[in-house]
Image (tube, helix red, strand yellow):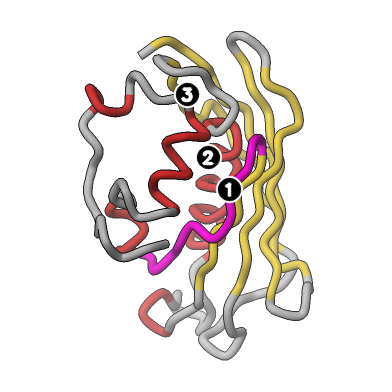
Amino acid sequence: MAATAGYGVVPIEQVRPMDGLALFEAMREGRLPAPPISRALGMSLEEVELGRVVFGYRPVFDHYNPLGTVHGGIAATLLDSVMGCCIHTTLKAGTGYTTVEIKINYVRAMTDKTGPVRAEGKIINVGSRIATSEGRLTDASGKLLAHGTTTCLVFPI
C-alpha cells in the first residue's frame, strides 16, 4: 500500500461511479486512502485482481488474548476482509455488499513470533444478489493458520 493517500474513508459520491476493481487498485496504488481498520490492525493491501485480493499482516503482542496468542478475532477480521473485498472487486459501479455470514476454522495459533502472514480471498460465486468466497490465512512458509467462507448480500448503493 503506497503511503501517499494515508488512511481515511472515501466519500460515497467518489466510490459510487467506480467499479470494485478500480477502487481497490486506486487504494493499492495510494491514489485513494486505505480504510482506518488497516491502520488499527496493521494490515495492508498487497495484491488485487478481479475476484482475488491479498492482505498482509504481522502479528503483534498488542493483539494477544489472555492465553498468550493473537486473538482469534484478528484472524476472523483478516479473513472477513479479504473474502468481502475479493467479492467487491467483481462488482459494477453503483453496487455494494455486506456480509451475511462467515465461517472460520482455526488451524494454528499466531503469536508475535509467527512473522508476516498472508490473507488471501478468492471468489466462489457472484450472483445478482448473493456472492460467496473463500479465504486462507497462511504464514511465510505457507502453513495454514485459518480458513473460511463467506456469504454476502449484493445491492445497489
What amino acid type is highlighted by mark number 2?
Cys
Label 3 vs label 1, nearer the camera? 1
Badge 2 vs badge 3, beta-carbon distance below 8 Å: no
- Rendered-image quadrant of the C terminus: top left
Earlier residue among tags 3 and 1: 1
Earlier residue among tags 1 and 2: 1
Neighbourhood count class around disc 1 (C-alpha, 10 Å): few under 14, some 14–19, many 20 upward: many
Q: Is residue 47 above or below residue 132?
A: below
Neighbourhood count class around disc 3 (C-alpha, 10 Å): few under 14, some 14–19, many 20 upward: many
Report the side of 133 relative to 78 (left or right).
right
Is-magenta flag for residue 46? yes
Q: Locate residue 64, reporting x and y percent.
A: 44, 78
Q: Residue at x 51, y 70 (%)?
A: 57
In the rendered image, which quarter is residue 5 located in? bottom left
Report the side of 9 relative to 43 (left or right).
left
Q: Which mark is residue 97?
A: 3
Looking at the picture, tell me which residue is in the foreground, 102 or 134: 134
User: What residue does disc 1 label?
Assistant: 48
Earlier residue among tags 2 and 3: 2
Report the side of 19 relative to 17 (left or right).
right
Q: Is residue 32 above or below residue 115?
A: above
Label 1 vs label 2, nearer the camera? 1
Badge 1 vs badge 2, beta-carbon distance below 8 Å: yes
User: What residue does disc 2 label?
Assistant: 85
Q: In the image, which residues are magenta?
A: 41-51
What secondary structure do most residues of the magenta stretch adopt? strand
Q: Residue at x 52, y 31 (%)?
A: 88
